[in-house]
Image (cartoon, helix red, strand yellow):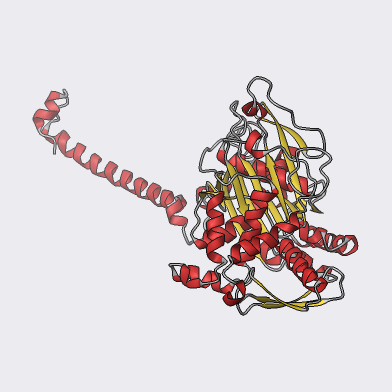
Amino acid sequence: MFSTESYAGLGQYPGKYRGVFTRSWLRLAAIVLGVLGLGYWVLFSLNSPSSLSGTGGSSKTQTVDPRLQSAHCDVPHPGRPLVQYVLMVDAGSTGSRIHVYKFNYCKDHPELEDEIFEQIKPGLSSFGDNADGAAHSLDGLMDVAMKGVPEQLRSCTPIAVKATAGLRMLGVDKSDKILEAVRSHLANDYPFKLIPNNPVEIMDGKDEGIYAWITVNFLLGTLGKEEHKTAATFDLGGGSTQIVFEPRYEKWNPETGGPQLAAGEHRYEMTYGGQEYTLYQHSYLGYGLMEARKKIKTLIAQEASSSGKFSIEHPCFPPGFREEVTAVDGKSQVTIKGAAKSSLDGKSAADACYKEVRKIFNKDAPCTQKPCSFDGVYQPELDKTFIDNPFYIFSYFYDRTYPLGVREEFKLSDIKLLTDKVCKHDVALFASKEQQEEVGMENHYCMDLSFQYALLRDGVGMPESRVVRSTRKIKDAETGWCLGASLAVLDQNRYCKFKSYF
């Protein structure tokens, strides 16, 4: 309560009778204000986000899907949407994979903010004449896309399906029917937007390699820099393998720069961030891991058949392995068995397997444009034109080395040591139970690692001392060609328009 002194200090000292009237008026005013305040509080509570939770209310703040927001900014670059999703389906030879990319346009160019990844087996090529079955095999991946992309953006989210070497080897008639069935299924049964140009296609091997190079260097942040410290990429798939790098001739000879990159299909020029890049690229069809297995086994069968043998023990495989293989002539059937230790006569199984594997590289093929890697293919020498920059190998390179303890950075000589160890065909040589089980359940480890080592050392000419890096992800994003292809999709067209959901 205020005292009379306090009122006097304000020049408002009330008299005895006036005080009674004033107190009654104040009580009435307090009651009226209290009623009004209670009413306002009730209305405010009913319209607040907390009061709407679980009640089916319609608060804008409460109903905005967080997938429509960016964690990096609230206002997009002028004329751009705040977020843009892209769906990229990788229809590989052994399985299909989907990448649900979320980009933001906080700047004038897209920045990767999030990625959802899922994969299934088998691949489209395994369906052969069943084109409709191939198309519907992607439904599991499309369910992931439907859950990952907010409903408001599905109609402006571009989708592309790019098949690689497996479907390419199926033949034109079968592959075309599968591609058309996939295109029709996506167009008629899902709300996403097929990209304007070739939304469902067999991707050229050149594009596969270039997109992988863009992906890795985009994630590393090396693009658009004056130093040009770009990384090389070597992607080992199931049906083919692609190498891409930026030769630096000035590192070879600072005065003359050495010879320049020859003209031809292997030469790829691009501009990014104001910097011009001249890249070397080549796709080796038939030298993916699964196709290499077939080549090696067929060669073993042919050599045995030519010697009049229809059964052979081979050091590339562990004891207990057995497989019927048709020789090159398509008529002779040869049984390939794993070699018992007693049959090696003290020789190294790793050396014997490596000697067999390197035959498939056809190093004696005519080299019309020097220098050549293998099979008569022109390639700048790595030890002269790509000395210091990072070298990333991934896909099956990673799948065959990481489970056995090889981590992200190592030398080529470490792959050789691991190959020697695996080819002893003794799981007890591996310390962990997980590694023992991994080696024990895969009969091709010795041959696979021998092929990978030979591909790097004898194939593309990588020095033993070269440090390489192998990883499945960089900055939580999958390596491979899909991110690079998605960036190209956004570069070629605009899809979602700016719209506020607040």
**Screen quadrant of the C terminus:** top right
The residue at the far front in this view is 345
The image shows residue 270 at horizontal and vertical percentages of 73, 33
Q: Nearer the viewer, residue 352 or 184?
A: 352
Q: Nearer the viewer, residue 384 or 53?
A: 384
Q: Is residue 199 left or right of residue 439?
A: right
Residue 65 at least partly seen: no
Q: Nearer the viewer, residue 253 or 107?
A: 253
The residue at the far right in this view is 173
Residue at image location 73% in from the left, 41% down from the top: 281
Q: Nearer the viewer, residue 411 or 219?
A: 411
The image shows residue 467 at horizontal and vertical percentages of 54, 44
User: Which image quadrant is residue 232 in?
Assistant: top right
Residue 51 at least partly seen: yes
Asked if 433 appears above or below 153 in the picture, the reply is below
Residue at image location 51% in from the left, 39% down from the top: 72
Asked if 48 appears above or below 278 in the picture, the reply is below
**Screen quadrant of the N terminus:** top left
User: Which image quadrant is residue 230 in?
Assistant: top right
Q: Is residue 321 left or right of residue 280?
A: left
